[in-house]
Image (cartoon, rainbow, N blue to C red):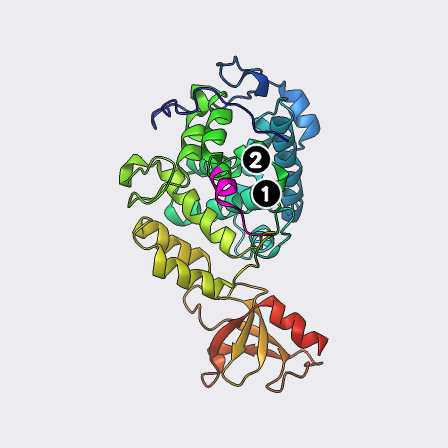
């Protein structure tokens, strides 16, 4: 696949204050350089293809719907066809409905890991994480959905990058890295064609890899020059990439990811965004593995916001790394002599189980 020759790639992004029109637009990739008229999909057709949400809706199914939608959008761009925004907005509306303390969708976004499907899964995960952070930051419903949609489409420019670069198992060459770093410009150009009503999508995509200290790219913007949505998504984009595998590398544990963010990125992101990140991502998430000071290994089954270092565990290997055959539950809040000393990567769990 060859790269698309975008014209006027450095055109200035629209202002942050552009109104957000809640309408359906279709993108013609062959007319990216020109402004398009909106093409509204009839409401009845939308209802037919996307049934309304209801109480008890399977939230895991929302992940599958997101995968179908985003895969279709990426393929449309790749083939210079059209894709619509409205189905994406509908999916995100459902994701934001209701209160889900132990959210299966959030847990799925944390743990689902397929290095050869990362292009689609990454943006979906970032959108799900963005909804969590929007809740924590007190965003209203409208801004929450805007942020989530900007997250879902922030890397739509990946459709322009050749697969041989996206899925290369070896380290990328300098030239390949440069091509990959151009994707914010590609994403901006694609999303800008939706018109002024959705200018925030294009502006956010263009700025996701900027950092408030000026160390980002492509323009080296600083502070408030960067749209708040881009600041939030940029942080979540980085964190999501750390805790998920890529073709050329393995993922790291949340414990390692948190340490890396704190040690290397505290000047690159807003303090309140970093605080929110640490609030929504417990150091030891549900379904992650930890090692106790007894050398036993447990799987996290419940967490507590006010005591993040003392979750409830199911012990799976004893201190001699022998598999525990009975259902042994340990609540660290009730066991002051037991402490977590480290997180355990899944690769180590697989190694122990094979011995």
Tag 1–tag 2 contact (CB < 8 Å): yes
Q: Position of residue 234 (x, y in %)?
A: 42, 44
Q: Nearer the viewer, residue 119 or 305?
A: 119
Q: Position of residue 151 (x, y in %)?
A: 49, 39
Can see residue 84? yes
Residue at left offset 58%, top offset 78%: 297
> Please, what secondary structure does the residue beneath circle 1 have?
helix
Disc 2 residue crowd, few under 14, some 14–19, many 20+, Cα 10 Å: many
Q: Horizontally, is 341 left or right of 86 in the view?
A: left
- Quadrant in the rendering for residue 134: top left
Q: Quadrant of the N terminus?
A: top right
Asked if residue 174 lies in the magenta stretch, the reply is yes
Residue at left offset 47%, top offset 39%: 178
Q: Can you identify the residue that label 2 sits on?
A: 161
Counting labels gives 2
- Quadrant in the rendering for residue 165: top right
Residue at left offset 40%, top offset 39%: 230
Asked if residue 68 lies in the magenta stretch, the reply is no
For the magenta stretch, what is the residue range?
A: 170-178
Residue 155 lies, with reference to residue 247, above or below; the image says above
Q: Nearer the viewer, residue 291 or 3?
A: 3
Q: Can you identify the residue that label 1 sits on?
A: 166
Can see residue 97? no
Q: Position of residue 167 (x, y in %)?
A: 62, 45
Q: Horizontally, is 71 left or right of 312 in the view?
A: right
Residue at left offset 57%, top offset 57%: 249
Q: Quadrant of the C terminus?
A: bottom right
Q: Position of residue 321 (x, y in %)?
A: 63, 83
Which mark is first along the chain, 2 or 1? Answer: 2
Measured Cα–Cα span from mark 1 to mark 2? 7 Å
> Please, what secondary structure does the residue beneath circle 2 have?
loop
Residue 304 lies, with reference to residue 269, above or below; the image says below
């Amino acid at each position: 696949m060859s790269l698309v020759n975008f014209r006027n790639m450095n055109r200035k992004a629209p202002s942050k204050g552009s109104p957000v029109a809640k309408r359906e637009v279709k993108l013609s990739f062959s007319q990216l350089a020109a402004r398009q008229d909106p093409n509204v999909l009839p409401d009845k057709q939308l209802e037919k293809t996307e049934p309304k949400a209801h109480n008890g809706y399977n939230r895991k199914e929302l992940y599958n719907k997101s995968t179908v939608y985003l895969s279709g959008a990426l393929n449309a761009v790749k083939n210079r066809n059209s894709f619509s925004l409205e189905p994406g907005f509908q999916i995100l509306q459902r994701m934001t409905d209701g209160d889900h303390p132990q959210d299966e969708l959030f847990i799925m976004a944390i743990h689902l890991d397929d290095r050869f499907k990362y292009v689609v899964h990454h943006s979906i995960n970032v959108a799900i994480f963005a909804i969590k952070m929007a809740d924590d930051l007190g965003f209203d419903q409208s801004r929450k959905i805007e942020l989530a949609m900007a997250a879902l489409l922030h890397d739509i420019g990946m459709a322009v990058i050749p697969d041989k670069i996206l899925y290369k198992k070896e380290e990328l060459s300098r030239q390949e890295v440069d091509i990959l770093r151009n994707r914010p410009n590609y994403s901006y150009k694609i999303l800008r064609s939706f018109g002024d009503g959705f200018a925030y999508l294009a502006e956010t995509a263009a700025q996701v890899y900027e950092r408030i200290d000026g160390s980002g790219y492509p323009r080296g913007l600083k502070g408030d020059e960067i749209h708040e949505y881009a600041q939030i998504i940029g942080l979540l984009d980085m964190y999501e990439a750390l805790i998920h595998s890529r073709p050329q590398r393995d993922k790291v544990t949340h414990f390692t990811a948190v340490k890396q963010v704190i040690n290397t990125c505290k000047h690159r992101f807003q303090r309140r965004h970093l605080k929110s990140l640490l609030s929504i991502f417990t150091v030891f998430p549900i379904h992650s593995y930890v090692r106790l000071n007894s050398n036993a290994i447990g799987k996290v089954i419940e967490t507590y916001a006010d005591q993040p270092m003392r979750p409830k565990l199911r012990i799976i290997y004893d201190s001699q790394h022998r598999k525990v055959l009975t259902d042994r539950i340990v609540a660290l809040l009730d066991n002051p002599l037991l402490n977590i000393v480290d997180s355990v990567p899944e690769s180590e769990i697989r190694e122990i189980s094979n011995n």
